[in-house]
Structure formats: C-alpha cells, structure tokens
Amino acid sequence: MKNEELNTAYDVMFMRRCLQLARCGEAGAPPNPMVGAVIVCDGRIIGEGYHRRCGGPHAEVNAINSVKEKDLLSRSTIYVSLEPCAHYGKTPPCADLIIETGIRRVVIGCADPFAKVNGLGIKKLQEAGCEVQVGVLEQECRKLNRRFFTFHQEHRPWIILKWAQSEDGIMGGDDRITFSNALTQTLVHRMRARSGAILVGTNTALQDNPTLTTRLWPGPNPLRLTIDRNGILPPTLHLKDNSTPTVIYTHESIEEILADLYVRGIGEGVQAPILAEAKLAGKQVFCQNKVETWERKQS
C-alpha cells in the first residue's frame, strides 16, 4: 500500500473516531454543534475529546488537555469533525490553541457554516504554517450536525416529520387505536428532548389533546406549536394549560411560520438576528409559561 493510500485510510479511521466521540455530546452540546477531536502521533492516539456542553471547552481543548506527553504535540496530527473556531465566544479560539501547541497537521471533517467561523479557522491555521486537510468523511460530518447546518445555511429549523401508521396505511379515524408501545414512546420523547419545537395541526390538538412535553427522556420541553386558523381550539386543551411555552398560529403560511421559528432561534444555533423583511408579531415566550397567539401584522 502506498504512503498516500495509507494516510487516507488512517485519516478516515481517525475521523470516524471523531464522529463517535462527537455523538457523546448529543445531550449537552446544543445549541452548539456536536464535535469530536482526536490527536495522533506516529499512528497512535495520544489524546481525544468532545464538546461536552454548551459554554464549556470545545472538543479540541479537551483533546489537547488529555495528552499526557505534551512534547509529542509538535509532531502530531489533530483530527476534528468540524472546523476549529477562530473567534472569541464563550471560549477562546480553538485555532489559536492548536497553533500555540505546535501541532503542524490538522485534518478537518467539514467547514463550519457559522458566520463568525465559516473558513476563518482554516485560513488562520494555514497562515500559521499548518498543513490543513478538509473534507474527510465530509458528508457524515455534515449529517451529524444537520440541524446546525440547516439553521445557519437555510435560515430555518431542520424538520422531522413523525407519524404513527398501521401496516395497511391507516393513520387515524373515529376508532382510536394506539399504535405506540413503550419503546416507541420513549424514542418519541428522546426526539422531543433533542428538538427546539414541536408542531401539531388543529385536528391532532382536538382529537388527541396532547401535552407535547418531554417526560420519558431527560431533557427540556420543546416549544409547543399548533395551528388554529378558525379559532376553534377550546381553552381546556393541554396546549393551553400554561405549563410550558406555547405558540398558536392563526393565519400564517408555512414560510411565515418557519421564518418566525428562525427569528426565535429554534434549531441548532444561537439566537438569530431578526429578519428585516419578515413582518413578525408577538413576544419571546421562553422565559415564562404562557400561551402566545401569533398573528400576521397588517401592512
């Protein structure tokens, strides 16, 4: 096997380890992306880490801190599933730390679409003389943080469509039959804990009277959303019990709803700037339990 082929095989193997580590941050990293990092010297892993929680050290910092023999860093390669940051946020720039430690080769799964990074980390590393390779298992790295990428590149939340259906294609009717079991219900609550918001239509709100809260899995409640175009949802519904923030849309198109959710910061990302072209009414409701009726502003 040629050296180039061997390096490629090693790069793929160690990037897969980065992805394994990154998934460990599923519960704590959001709204930041999940990121894993591995430091390799002479074909041997000497340090690794992942982004454990939002506001805490990034994956690269944890990986570097885990290395016992720091003198090995100058001849090591660091693998990281997402481009190292180049800006001061809640933590200092990871690109600066990599440069300071003397690591000369950096292998990156994919670039970071966040406006304050977006190639600047790669540029800073290259200007410091580091050998930088980008795009190892790129699609897998992007898929891992598809919520984060959708939020920052398409300016809307990542959407998951969930329903229960019988084998013969029946989804509901006059006879209420439960398709779910304990396992599927637990998985649904896990999805809720990982989602910023959950939306049901008028009929589901009336017929099922769901609470839409997270109870069977550790994690926060999503922002509850429903649509009531004809004003027929009664005040006795769980969605109007003031137990957790809820938004009721009355006349909005799906495009306007997605624009509103982006402005609210729903999705894997920091609070988004208000879009000048979006005529959005209403108040932020994250800090208190209340029901908000969202209506289009009149021009």
Image (spheres, helix red, strand yellow):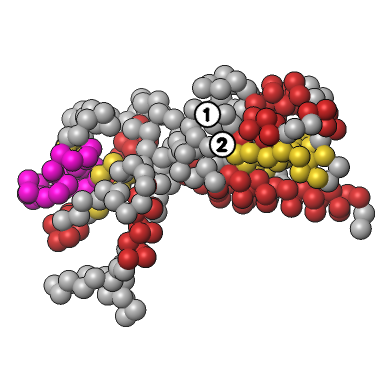
Q: Is residue 190 magenta?
A: no
Instruction: Give the image location of residue 15, x and y in percent.
Output: 70, 47
Question: Please, which residue is most extreme toward the right here?
Answer: 2
Q: Secondary structure at mark 2?
A: loop
Badge 2 crowding class, 10 Å Cα cut-off, few under 14, some 14 to 19, many 20 or more, is many
Instruction: Give the image location of residue 134, x and y in percent.
Output: 72, 40
As rendered, which of 85 and 263 lies closer to the eye? 85
Tell me what residue is drawn at x 20 percent, y 34 percent. 289
Tell me what residue is drawn at x 26 percent, y 48 percent. 213
Q: Which label was assigned to residue 51?
A: 2
Q: Is residue 151 visible?
A: no
- The span shown in magenta is 225-253
Instruction: Give the image location of residue 284, x and y in percent.
Output: 26, 29
Left or right of 148 on screen, residue 16: right
Residues tagged 2 and 1 counted as in contact (Cβ below 8 A): yes
**Quadrant position of the C terminus in the picture:** top left
**Quadrant position of the N terminus in the picture:** bottom right
Which residue is denoted by mark 1 in the rendering?
A: 56
